[in-house]
Image (tube, rainbow, N blue to C red):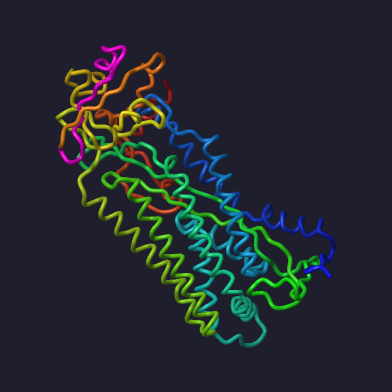
Amino acid sequence: MHDWTAVGGWGRIIVVAVLSFLLNPLHYVATTLIIWDLIRNIRAERAWFGIRVTRIVKPLIIRYLKASLVGLLGSILLLALGVSVSWQSVLLVACVAIVAGAVRGRFASSAVAISVVLTLAFVAHWLPSGEQSHLANVISFLQGISTRSWLLIAVVTCLSELFLQWWNQRDAVFPALVTSKRGRSIGALKIQLGFVTPLVVWMTPVQHISLNLHAGFKPWLLSPHASVAICVLPVVFGIHGLFTALRPERVLVQWRWWNLIYAALFVSGFAILQWTNSRYGLIVAPLFIVLNECIRSIWRHVDMATEPLCAPDARGVMILYTIRGSLSERLGLRPGEVVTHVNQTPVHTAFDLHFAFEQNAAYAKFQVIDERGETRLVGNPVYEGERHQLGLLVAPEDKLALSLKRPLGFLETLYLRRHKQAMHSFEESASL
């Protein structure tokens, strides 16, 4: 005897699983906003630096392939644990993410949306159902949500974000210019790293289409001889932010540690529910929201209170960004360092830097002052075809740019706006 029996045929079961993903509006909305956020970079980069730094098609395809692979591993774990949800709860989480995201982008994150739904379920547990009414039906529905399963989905969501951030950290940072309070342009670095990851879980049967599990096969949380269908749900997450003082690489490392802490928090809530059968395990949901907002606020205030990393420097040319795979990256030049000499020629502007670089056709030698104020020399042979691939961006002092804001959170860089005094210059550059 087989461990399971397919009622309605495997074809219909697969169709239901695929439709559960295709009919979910969340992944369409999230994918559109992630792409649009990157497209907005291109126009600004050409106006500021004369080149396009952001690449969209190939990096996004690779990013989504990685997200699918991580989602596959997470799905295997969730299916083995017996995580089962209803299609109504999947739709509720998607709607909460979209509505909350309309209020503020960072609230569209799946971990936040799941936490909101679990908080509502916790509150509904203490409310009387009362007589038959629309409110009573809503309360009854919230009381029936499989909170254990959604807590485990939140755990996998946090761990997926951790791994994907680590896997894609080299493609996460982009240069920007902001207008300081004194009206001058200073360099800034943006993190733009968003994901849509498909997760496969068990689902309550739909229209007599199901898998009937037998005694030989039983995922942990499912009851014996359960009847289930298969659902593919999208989870969305990521980190978007702008920093003038903090190094994005350090922020990403700390963010991954916090993802690990969040995952442990949801695990503790699941353990309380599973082994004590106490609804107080759901307190981890509002605790996650509060903790996430507190960490975000702390980072923003630290960045605000710290001296800018890429402000203009009288000693030479301040490095804002090195393009991946370029000569400047191979030389080990980093944002926040000051180039004082190129090929033994003093430099104070971007024009000086490139003019001095062109003076030696075979070798590039840079004298650099690092963040600690120490001087170092770096050099590298310049091969044929590399003369125009220095890949070093500096913050131009004569261009007003974005308003000085410090967004941080999923899709938060969508709220970056041009400085009012810069609107006219942007329009002129676009007309040219």
Residue at x-position 70% and y-position 72%: 218
Quadrant in the picture for the N terminus = bottom right
Residue at x-position 38% and y-position 21%: 389
- With respect to residue 341, does 21 lie above or below? below
Does residue 302 appear left or right of residue 262 in this picture? left
Magenta segment, which residues? 354-373
Tell which of 394 and 213 is nearer to you. Answer: 213
- With respect to residue 81, does 34 lie above or below? above
Does residue 426 appear left or right of residue 145 in this picture? left
| Figure disc tally | 0
Residue 363 is one of the magenta-drawn residues: yes
Quadrant in the picture for the C terminus = top left
Q: Residue 300 location in percent, x, y?
A: 30, 54
Q: Residue 274 location in percent, x, y?
A: 55, 80
- With respect to residue 364, does 42 lie above or below? below
Residue 345 is one of the magenta-drawn residues: no
Q: Residue 113 location in percent, x, y?
A: 52, 63
Residue at x-position 51% and y-position 45%: 34
Location of residue 361 by image quarter = top left
Residue at x-position 35% and y-position 58%: 296
Q: Residue 88 location in percent, x, y?
A: 66, 68
- With respect to residue 294, does 417 lie above or below? above
Location of residue 343 by image quarter = top left
Does residue 314 appear left or right of residue 197 in this picture? left
Tell which of 137 and 155 is nearer to you. Answer: 155
